[in-house]
Image: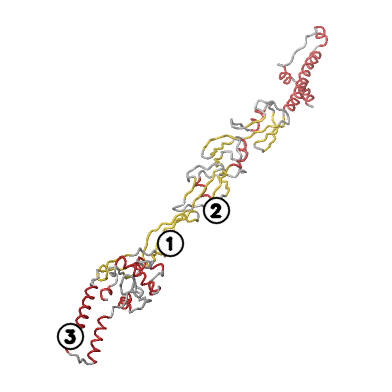
Amino acid sequence: MTMGAHSDNVTAGTDATEEFGSVAVAEPQDTDSTSSTGTASTGRKLRKPVLAVAAALAVALVAGGSIAAAMNKTVTITVDGQAQEISTFSGSVSGALESAGLSVSEHDMLAPAADTAIQDGSQIAIERGRLLTLSIDGQTREVWTTADTVEEALTELGQNPASYTLSADRSREIPLDGLALSAETIHSATVADGAGAAEGVQSSAETVGALLAERGITLGELDTVAPAAETPLSDGLQIAVTRVAKTTVTEQVDVPQPADQQVEDSSATVGTSTVTQQGTAGKDQVTYEVTSTNGAETSKVETGRSPLTAAQPTIVSVGTKEPVKVSAPAQSSSRSSQSQSASSESSSRSASSAQSSAPAQESASSSSSSSSTPAPSSSGSSGINWDGIAQCESTNNWSINTGNGYYGGLQFDIPTWNSGGGSQYASRPDLASREQQIAVAENVAATRGSSPWACASHG
């Protein structure tokens, strides 16, 4: 059809001839033919070149259409997973991207390369680069990545996402305009709080103190933690919290009886003693500061004391007065003189009157008998009349105990009783027999005479 149309046009007149005259090529002329055929021959000679040119032009148009059809390609371009198909006459990847209106930056990933030849059905992929500002344990760096998500980006960087506490979810997409991400390394440690058992923990806290705060563990004023709170957290670190408490308690405690005391008594005879105050233990109210560590008492310090019942010593009054001594021979001489006087008188009366009445003789005999009667006999070798002393001291009550510190018929005090060997008989004189008390008295008299007994001076 095209070519036919081009033939009709050319045959129609001289204009078409002029249009193609510049490209047409004329054939050589035959003189004989020219002269014999005339004008008609000339017309036929002109039509052949025109038809040849028209046919050539038609062939060229058909061939050009076929070539153009052969150069057009359908190419699939995928950008960050989103695919689109385009048609292009370009023979390379870069040409196809230009046809699609796409550009690639230095941080993008393109496959295949830009200068790679393409054909119909070729696949082109672009992964856009994204700026990731990454801070790991406080160390910050900027990296370009073509990963779509946080998890993919960390994996590309050789980091295990599970080893960190992240500021963004692992599955979060990284936008084209970039993302700031912080990651804190997760450490495994153990924490023992007070007397409790150690507990394994995992945390991305930077220090021991931060870990305790993260777990809600607070330290009291006296509590301690080891290692120190500012110690960096690391794998395998053992953390111990020591709980320390101080309390105040009040208790009643016994106070021992003080040592016995002796006081001198100038009104009492030497060798005598009297218990004037019986000793007793006392009781105090004592205040303590008690320190406990992890619930166990570790120290107890007295901080105050006040007496409830005062402790009393036993007080013994010891006599210092020297006894008055009366000479026994003087008394015997006096009695002898009186006896001789009575005998002389009786003899005088007998000589002057031979006729003495019976009553007078009886009286003289009675007087003579009285003067010659001996004193009561001594109870021991000392010659001391112990019964007479006992009569004076205790009215001869050998088992008397009045509670005044003196005991028995001879009124021994305990020190004198023991010094004379009385403890071999009984713990107190009043518990011993009369004979045992006299035996002890003889022992005492052997070294001290009768000075311990005031009554001896009145015998």
Decide which of 317, 375 is in the foreground and name it.
375
Which amino acid is tagged 1? Val
Q: Quadrant of residue 86?
A: top right
Residue at 52% across, 52% down: 193
Kindly identify which residue carries mark 3: 348
Please tell me which of labels 3 and 2 falls first in the chain.
2
Q: Is residue 83 above or below residue 444?
A: above
Residue count near mark 3 (Cα–Cα under 10 Å), binned few <14, some 14–19, many ≥20: few
Dot 2: what SS?
loop
Tell me, for residue 141, which label it has, or none. none
Residue count near mark 1 (Cα–Cα under 10 Å), binned few <14, some 14–19, many ≥20: few
Direction from residue 77 to residue 306 in the image, left or right: left
- Spatial CA distance of label 3 from label 1 is 101 Å
- Spatial CA distance of label 1 from label 2 is 26 Å
Q: Position of residue 219 (x, y in %)?
A: 47, 52
Which amino acid is tagged 2? Gly
Residue 405 visible in image: no
Q: Position of residue 366 (x, y in %)?
A: 25, 86
Q: Position of residue 45 (x, y in %)?
A: 79, 14
Q: Where is the C terminus found, in terms of image quarters?
A: bottom left
Kindly identify which residue carries mark 2: 196
Dot 3: what SS?
helix
Kindly identify which residue carries mark 1: 249
